[in-house]
Amino acid sequence: GNSVTQMEGPVTLSEEAFLTINCTYTATGYPSLFWYVQYPGEGLQLLLKATKADDKGSNKGFEATYRKETTSFHLEKGSVQVSDSAVYFCALSPVSGGSNYKLTFGKGTLLTVNP
Amino acid sequence: GAVVSQHPSWVICKSGTSVKIECRSLDFQATTMFWYRQFPKQSLMLMATSNEGSKATYEQGVEKDKFLINHASLTLSTLTVTSAHPEDSSFYICSANPRGTNEKLFFGSGTQLSVL
């Protein structure tokens, strides 16, 4: 079956530090890949997505590239801010094209950014 | 942006009682809603897919008689945990697909259920 393995947290960084949260997946076919973010007290929100191999999703300074050869979708940001403190979830959908049907999630990584 | 309201945000109940969790789409119609469960330090696991006006589709291993899902309108789905036991203690999250798209998904903020 499909699965997502995500870097264990928590991750604590200082403001302006570089962030990487690793995510690898197992799936058949051509899944769509997502990063969701959950800020304290709020629901999950889509941060970025990639629908096919070599696609790069980007939003709010975050980037992730769909690497089929390494089955990875690592999240990166060059300079984090205190406001980026949240839980980040990597997810996949077995359906290509960006559909969020039947998402499989990773365990989530708590990021805390200190001033 | 679109908002999904989930209520209550936390609930404590005695073993053997039933608990209802509501998921409402506040500014859009949702033809499909999803219910997830997350145990501590584990992934969100899809429990069931709920379509308005029809029976929910449950994932393998999820007891449909224990987790009753009702999607009676385009803006409301409910999950009732019947005869709750301590092992049902978990974080439950709903999400909703706006009508006409399968590429947008909006999440509630979750319900922490603790069964004593």
Image: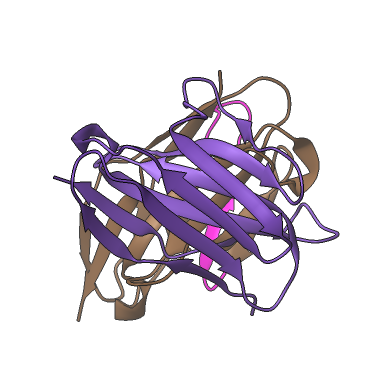
Chain colours: A brown, B purple
Considering the whole magenta stretch, tell me its main secondary structure: loop
| The C terminus of chain B, quarter of image | top left
Rendering quarter of residue A30: top right
Q: Nearer the viewer, residue A55 or B3?
A: B3
Residue at (54%, 73%) from the top-left corner?
A: A60
Residue at (52%, 54%) from the top-left corner?
A: B94
Residue at (26%, 59%) from the top-left corner?
A: B11
Q: Nearer the viewer, residue B56 or B101?
A: B56
The answer to whether residue A41 is above or below residue A115 is above
B100 left or right, relative to B93: right
Whether A62 is among the magenta residues is yes
Question: What is the x, y in percent for residue A68?
Answer: 63, 30
Residue at (64%, 58%) from the top-left corner?
A: B96
What is the magenta range? A59-73
Whether B97 is among the magenta residues is no
Query: Can the viewer see residue B50?
Result: yes
Question: What is the x, y in percent for residue B95?
Answer: 57, 56
Rendering quarter of residue A57: bottom right
Query: Can the viewer see residue A77?
Result: no
Q: Residue furthest left?
A: B116
The answer to whether residue B113 is above or below residue B29 is above
A18 left or right, relative to A72: left
